[in-house]
Amino acid sequence: MGAAGSTRPLPDAGGRYTAHPYIAGSALSLHSGCMSHISSAQGACLLVIGNEILSGRTQDRNIQFLARALGEHGLPLREVRVIPDVRETIIATVNETRARFAHVLTTGGIGPTHDDITSECVAAAFGVPWEPHPEAWALMEAHYPPGGFNPARQRMATMPRGATLIANPVSLAPGFSIGNVHVMAGIPTVMQAMFQDLVKRLPAGLPVLSRTVHAWNIAEGTIAADLATLQLRWPDVEIGSYPFQKEENGKRIYGIAIVAKGTDARKLDEVADSVMELFETFNVSPVLGELDRTS
């Protein structure tokens, strides 16, 4: 609602004003129907595989990198799942997601130890043999001294039949693609290097752009209904609200960053302008751009 709880009108995409649609007790989701022009079949899914992630021992650092990189490439990340090193779970999840999404990326579980089972599980999901990959085998065998390419390392050169290699300039052992599934290492530096090779083969679409407006001295609950109105005006723009806070002179101060994402720069500018106007109606000073968290 507005500052006084009224059904205050807000501008639509064409600058027109309409009554507020919010009804108490039935708040509209900001993301309901947004970005509807991008279906899961057009986007990507990431499977983060590893018991160490689920146990809390290791903090994932790959999701943010891939979300940004895929968005910039025009292949938005639509879903992320974190699953254990359990054969049945990996096989079932790979089969489910590769049928739903244009591309599935996996991280983790392709090392030399007994619990690195992602590669053999992907082979099982596709119903093909898990066997020495001639190119990967030759590459790794030539790298190690005599006797160094032991059975453990040979596992990293064993892949589903028909797989295409994803180069690894950091530690040599390659990832691979089969169908629309792309298997990479879990170590962030290695995964990022692999992605630079993989992305050359991924279909490019319109990059996902964003605009951010933030302001202090306002809380989400104050403008939630108005944001729902804006989302209805621009259903193909994803509008998200992200609160932040700080301590100042013994007092807690709240603020909000409103982020609009989509592929149409003009519409994003229109949304940002409307958000600026919305903030100003509550007598706060909006700033176009991300919050500077270093100050």
Image (cartoon, rainbow, N blue to C red):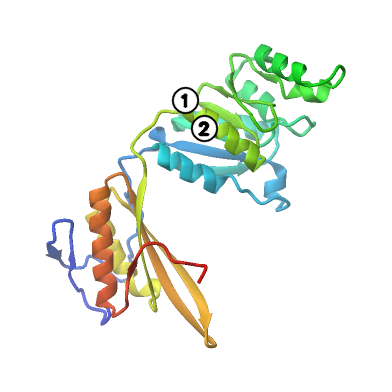
In this orientation, which residue lies closer to the viewer: 207 or 2?
207
Q: In the image, what residue occupies the spot 18% across and 60% down?
A: 12
Percent of width and height locating residue 61: 61, 48
Mark 1 lies on a secondary structure that is: helix
Q: Earlier in the sequence, mark 1 or mark 2?
A: 2
Q: Can residue 95 be seen in this view?
A: no
Vertical side of 212 occupied by 163: above or below: above
Percent of width and height locating residue 28: 32, 61
Vertical side of 71 occupied by 9: above or below: below
Relative to residue 113, is residue 134 drawn left or right? left
Q: Quadrant of residue 43?
A: top left
Total numbered circles: 2
Q: Can residue 257 be seen in this view?
A: yes
Q: Tell me the mark number nearer the camera, choosing from 1 and 2.
A: 1
Amino acid at circle 2: Val
The residues tagged by marks 1 and 2 sit, at their Cα atoms, a distance apart of: 13 Å
- The residue that disc 2 covers is 104
- The residue that disc 1 covers is 201
Amino acid at circle 1: Arg
Disc 1 residue crowd, few under 14, some 14–19, many 20+, Cα 10 Å: few
Which quarter of the figure is the N terminus placed in? Answer: bottom left
Residue placed farthest to the top in the image?
Answer: 134
Vertical side of 49 occupied by 2: above or below: below
